[in-house]
Image (spheres, rainbow, N blue to C red):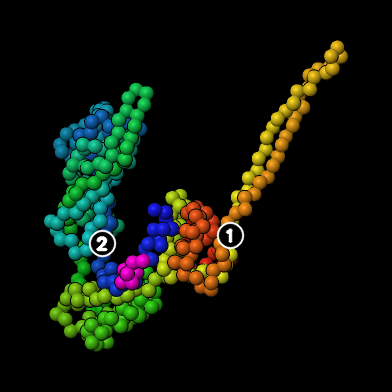
Amino acid sequence: MTLFRLLACLLLLPTLAQAGAVRLKDLVEFDGVRGNDLVGYGLVVGLNGTGDGLRNAPFTEEIMSTILERLGVNVTGEEFRPKNVAAVFVTASLPPFARAGSQIDVTVSAIGDSKSLLGGTLIMTPLNAADGQIYAVAQGTVLAGGASAEGQAASVVRGVPTAGVIPSGARVEREIEFDLASLTQLRLALREPDFTTAGRIEAAVNATFNARVAIMRDSGTVELDIAATRTRSTAHAIGRIENILVEPERKARVVVDQRSGTIVMGADVRISRVAVSQGSLTLRVEETPIAVQPNPFADGDTVVVPRTTAEIEQDPGIKLAELSESASLSDVVAGLNALGVSPHDMIDILKTIKAAGALHAEFVVR
């Protein structure tokens, strides 16, 4: 099935699937209810000879010496070159309202010249937030998502064996102080700011509580008066609000991925009356040199005379019939699909239509 046939099939979906109501929790972020990024620097041990080369990664030796001395092993002045350790960065996201003792997932990534983290174990690594405080400690067996093998003359790598994850590999040690219950005003931040969507959210929330609870501040913010909701707490108010159904308004947008030839167009894309012709130009140059010899019994040398043939051919090309005023996506897809236009040709056509001012949508190229 071609891309354009697939898009045409999508147009046949029910209206509810095209522009249905969406839960408020899927449209907005609640002010203050957010996660925090954590990062740490640690050591993975137990590798099968695929660790860092300590001559090329001196920081691995430094952290290894620090850990051993912390455990009571004095390695000052000693020279050791193990191949089963690797320095790594450990990253994680601390979810909102995470309590001390709860566990979170971590991602482990090699920063030296280690070839693989398969089978390695992360040694206890503190994870810091942007304020420099330690909020979690990570440790555990690394689950790498790749494989590598090598011989004397060749090597093969599949996936990324130098990065992996540790499910529930970090334990929260410090909580982030945020008193949700004390809030009297709560802002809803739209993930995609739009005045129409914000107005619909305001109307839906006010209708749910039958009171003037929400007010639209701008295209990306709706402010809630927690006291006007008459609920027992801020958490109860959020729990009642987040499941309200609102139909979002989307901008007309065309997204193009040039590498894969993928084209995604929204149902609201409109194209004015336009005609498009496209042809291919073929330039052919051939060299057929001729050897010219002197007459018999005459003095002279054989000379090579160049002969060049140059031709230019232009195929008739395709012509897209003029579209009616404000043609819809279904009209464009049906017309281009009938002409057998390839996705890459479609990308060039859309660029040209946009440059001509006939494509009424946001054009995004990736």
- The residue wearing badge 1 is 319
Identity of the residue furthest to the left in this view: 101
Q: Picture quarter containing residue 34?
A: bottom left
Circle 1 Cα neighbour tier, 10 Å, few/some/many (<14 / 14–19 / ≥20) = few
Rendered residue at 47%/67% (across/down):
331
Position in image of residue 159 (x %, y %): 31, 40
Q: Looking at numbered disc 1 in the image, what kind of residue is underneath it? A: Lys
Residue nearest the viewer, comparing 287 with 209 = 287
Q: Is residue 67 above or below residue 365?
A: above
| Horizontal arrangement in the rendering, residue 277 relative to residue 2 (left or right) | right
Q: Position of residue 102 (x, y in %)?
A: 14, 56
Q: Is 13 in the magenta?
A: yes
* Number of the label disc, if any, that sits on residue 35: 2
Residue 11: quadrant of the picture: bottom left
Q: Which residues are magenta?
A: 12-18
First-in-chain label (2 vs 1): 2
